Structure formats: structure tokens, C-alpha cells
Amino acid sequence: MQNTSSKKQASPRKRVSPAKKKLALEVIGRLKKEYPVAECTLDYENAWQLLVSVRLAAQCTDARVDQITPLLYEKFPDVPALAAAEPEQIEEIVRPCGLGRSKARDISACMRVLHEKYDDHVPETFEELLALPGVGRKSANLIMGDVFGKPAIVTDTHCIRLCNLIGLVDGIKEPAKVERELWKIIPPEEGNDLCHRFVHHGRAVCIARRPQCGKCCLQDICRHGKTVVQPADHAAE
């Protein structure tokens, strides 16, 4: 069942660009050297906590989420406790993450489904994850990759921005469309770690408003980076 789910995500029979596939492999290799450790930037101990954290991370920083979740888990330490909590009780704690009411409502509903339908466990298929309240493709892919070790591509804002700048995709901003294009050119076993490395690189070097192209390990192969004129002293090195 798991392999069938992955194939549905991958859509492997569509046209593949050899140049983009070659570029993707080079990007993967260079970012592996630059960021040997590829891991989620959210703190969690188990699958249900990652579901909570990724919902709270919408329009909020991971650092803020990691400050709030220990307070949430101190009061509601497991799935049954969160499932029994009223959304208003959850909202009182998670409000600093923004959109407190909708996030609390989704977390409450999601935990109740886990408790009532899945015996307090997170389901292991992509389709079942997508059916959980408040869980979209980004969250489902993150769980599939980080928790269950399945092929996954998490198209968050860093991934979408970097893929367009590098030239892995062409002017595509919709997460699901970017995901489909990346499945064509990225080896399934590399997708999850690559997306984590995109986050690390997007925060450290390819910063949204001020990309540090001169310091980027991808500049000579990046579509945007190749258009940036380097300072004379750097170019002479």
C-alpha cells in the first residue's frame, strides 16, 4: 500500500528534461557536502507531535513553534489528552503562533480522529494523512519522509523559491505543481533530505530578500546566480 501511494505522488511517466535531471543531481551532491546533516528544523519526539508542530508552523517561525509546543505538551502530554481538550483550551496556549483559533480547531479535530479511528497512532499512508483535519500535502509529505522513511518532497516556501531561482522549475509557484515537477527529476530516495537542505540553504545563504550569491556553492550552476555580477576582489580569487 505504501509503494502504491508513493507512485501516485511521483507521476513518473511524464516528460522528463535530461538537463534538469542532471542539474538536480548536481544540486543534490553539492548541498550534501554543504549540509551533511539533513533534518527537520521543528522539534518533536513522535509522529503526532510533528503533525501538531507543522500545523502551528503555518505563517509562523519554527523557533516560535518550538517555544510553544513544550507548554502545550506539558498540559496535554499525549493524543488522548489533546483529543479530550476543547479547542479553546488549545487556543489559549498556541495563540502566540498566530491564527490561534483555526490552528487549535484543526489540532483538536486531528487528535480526535487519531484517537477514535487510529488508536492514538498516525496513519502510514499518504491518502489517510491527507484526510486528517488540517493536514495538506506539505504536512503529509513531511510525515511520510521524516517519520516513515518513505519518498517525499516537501514544497515549502524555501523549496519553491530556490527551485525557481536555480532553474529546477520554471516560474511555478503552486506547491502541488512544483512537487509534481520535482518528482520527475529527483531520485525518490533523495527528495526528503533535499527539501530539508533547501531550508538550511535558504536560511543561511539564499535568503529571500538578500541572497548571498557570492557565498553560494551553487552559483555557477544556478540560473539566478549566474546572472549576478560578483565583486572584483571575489572574482579574482
Image (cartoon, helix red, strand yellow):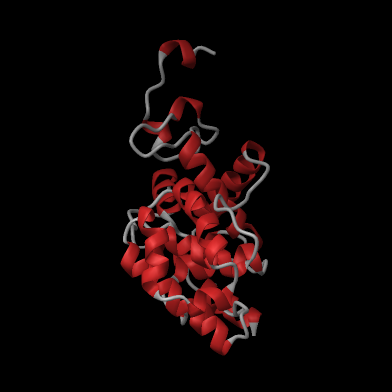
Relative to 210, is 176 above or below?
A: below
Figure check: 117 above or below 226: below
Please say whether residue 176 is visible from this viewpoint. no
Q: Position of residue 229 (x, y in %)?
A: 37, 23
Residue in view at x 61 percent, y 64 percent: 145
Residue at (66% x, 38% y) in the render: 33
Q: Please state, as top left, top right, bottom left or bottom right, where the N terminus lies in the image.
A: bottom right
Residue at 40% from the left image edge and 69% from the top image edge: 89
Residue at the image position 51 percent from the left and 56 percent from the top: 71
The image quadrant of residue 77 is bottom right
Residue 29 place in picture, x, y as percent:
64, 44
Q: Position of residue 173 (x, y in %)?
A: 33, 57
In the image, residue 205 above or below residue 136: above
Q: Can residue 102 be seen?
A: yes
Q: Is residue 232 above or below residue 60?
A: above
Q: Nearer the viewer, residue 196 or 22?
A: 196
Looking at the picture, tell me which residue is in the foreground, 129 or 32.
Answer: 129
- Quadrant for the C terminus, please: top right
Left or right placement of residue 16 versus residue 170 in this view = right
